[in-house]
Image: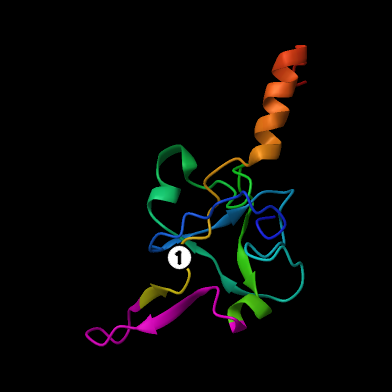
Amino acid sequence: MAKHHPDLIFCRKQAGVAIGRLCEKCDGKCVICDSYVRPCTLVRICDECNYGSYQGRCVICGGPGVSDAYYCKECTIQEKDLRNNISPKRSNLPTFASRDGCPKIVNLGSSKTDLFYERKKYGFKKR
């Protein structure tokens, strides 16, 4: 979704150990390029994006998460994912070094904002 909507902004902070989730609507998509083919690497998000009421929410749209999020094979090859490094001090514990940072989308985007105000203007209510 972020690839096709240039007004959406990624968090891009240092990713932590929390695993990104996807809702039913976004299930199976790559977080970066919206591809449905060859899921490869598990998505890690920063601690701020997984804190409080944001815990377990969809990385793309913010809905309730039902499955884990993955990067596709092409985004992994292009290094848009998170890579596993082995810590030199403790060889059995992996450290996560971010290539592009946390992939959580932090703003709504102009289309959703416009829809909200348009509904408010005409008095439509959600069912």
Q: Residue 85: horizontal and vertical position, in percent?
A: 38, 83
Q: Main secondary structure of the magenta part?
A: loop
Per the image, label 1 sits on a secondary structure element best described as loop
Q: Residue 113: horizontal and vertical position, in percent?
A: 65, 32
Scheme by which the image is coloured: rainbow
Q: Is residue 106 left or right of residue 39?
A: left
Residue at position x 43%, y 80% in the image = 84
Residue 81 vs residue 56, the one in the foreground: 81
Q: Residue 105: horizontal and vertical position, in percent?
A: 55, 51
Q: Which residue is mark 1?
A: 101
Q: Is residue 107 left or right of residue 96?
A: right
Q: Up-down: is 125 above or below 19?
A: above
Q: Up-down: is 100 above or below 61?
A: below
Quadrant placement of the N terminus: bottom right
Residue at position x 68%, y 26% in the image = 116
Q: Is residue 86 left or right of residue 99?
A: left
Residue type, label 1: Gly
Residue 86 vs residue 8, the one in the foreground: 8
Point out the stretch of residues depicted in magenta. 77-94
Structural crowding at the residue carrying mark 1, measured as other residues with C-alpha within 10 Å and reported as few (<14), some (14–19) or many (≥20): many
Q: Residue furthest top?
A: 123
Q: How many marks?
A: 1
Q: Is residue 119 left or right of residue 71?
A: right
Q: Residue 94: horizontal and vertical position, in percent?
A: 36, 78
Quadrant placement of the C terminus: top right
On whether residue 54 falls in the magenta region, the answer is no
Q: Up-down: is 116 above or below 7?
A: above
Residue at position x 45%, y 60% in the image = 12
